[in-house]
Image: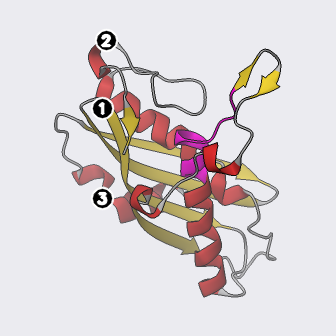
């Protein structure tokens, strides 16, 4: 899995530059396997996910187009959980009490997404429900660490969590 994602991403040929970071992760759940390679940019305290390559294996692929859509939707949801989505509380009450106050990914937040579907005809289909979402936040966290030298260990990872070498994050763009 990781090799398939890394090959499609061009992991060996990535170029380190200021404000750019690269992260990789992998995982498995319920007979499915996932690997992610992510590129982020960090500028003026803002983090943007630029590119995601996700390799996914869930046994025999019955409908490749639908599976690709599932994987890409999971990437969008994973970006939301990793970068934006949270509920604020004050005095034991929910402050984020309207959908309009709950930040989810927008079209402008979407990176280039590339899917690698590994069709294992020798295995029964295991389904693609939740597994494609699970490795994205760790890969984004690794990419932020690569760009800034700071390890963020709670979600959402920004805004306001980078300090010192990464600068205070004012916004996610």
Which labelled disc corresponds to residue 7? none
Between 86 and 34, which is closer to the camera in this rendering? 86
Q: Is residue 123 above or below residue 42?
A: below
**Mark 2 or 1, nearer chain start:** 1
Q: Residues within 10 Å of mark 3 (few under 14, many from 20)?
A: few
- Say whether residue 42 is left or right of residue 24: left
Tell me the residue at 72%/80% (across/down). 60
Place of residue 83 in the rendered image (x, y in percent of width and height, measured from the top left): 52, 40
Kindly indicate the quadrant of the structure image that contains residue 132: bottom right
Quadrant in the picture for residue 31: bottom right
> Residue placed at 81% from the left, 77% from the top?
124
**Which residue is tagged 2?**
164
- Nearest to the observer: residue 81 or residue 57: 81
Numbered disc in front, either 2 or 3: 2
Which residue, given by chain and number where applicable, does mark 1 sit on? 147
- In this rendering, the answer to whether 33 lies above or below 164 is below
85 sits to left or right of 48 = right
| SS under mark 3 | loop
């Amino acid at each position: 899995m990781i090799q398939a994602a890394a090959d499609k991403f061009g992991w060996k040929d990535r170029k380190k530059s200021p404000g750019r970071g690269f992260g990789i992760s992998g995982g498995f759940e319920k007979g499915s396997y996932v690997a992610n390679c992510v590129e982020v940019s960090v500028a003026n305290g803002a983090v943007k996910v630029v590119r995601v390559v996700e390799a996914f294996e869930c046994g025999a692929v019955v409908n490749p187009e639908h599976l690709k859509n599932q994987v890409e939707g999971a990437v969008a949801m994973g970006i939301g959980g990793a970068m934006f989505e949270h509920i604020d509380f004050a005095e034991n009450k929910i402050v984020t009490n309207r959908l309009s106050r709950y930040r989810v990914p927008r079209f402008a937040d979407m990176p280039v997404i590339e899917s690698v579907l590994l069709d294992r005809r020798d295995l029964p289909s295991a389904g693609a429900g939740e597994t494609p979402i699970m490795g994205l936040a760790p890969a984004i966290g690794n990419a932020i660490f690569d760009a800034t030298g700071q390890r963020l260990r709670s979600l959402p990872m920004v805004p306001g969590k980078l300090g010192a070498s990464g600068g205070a994050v004012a916004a996610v763009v």
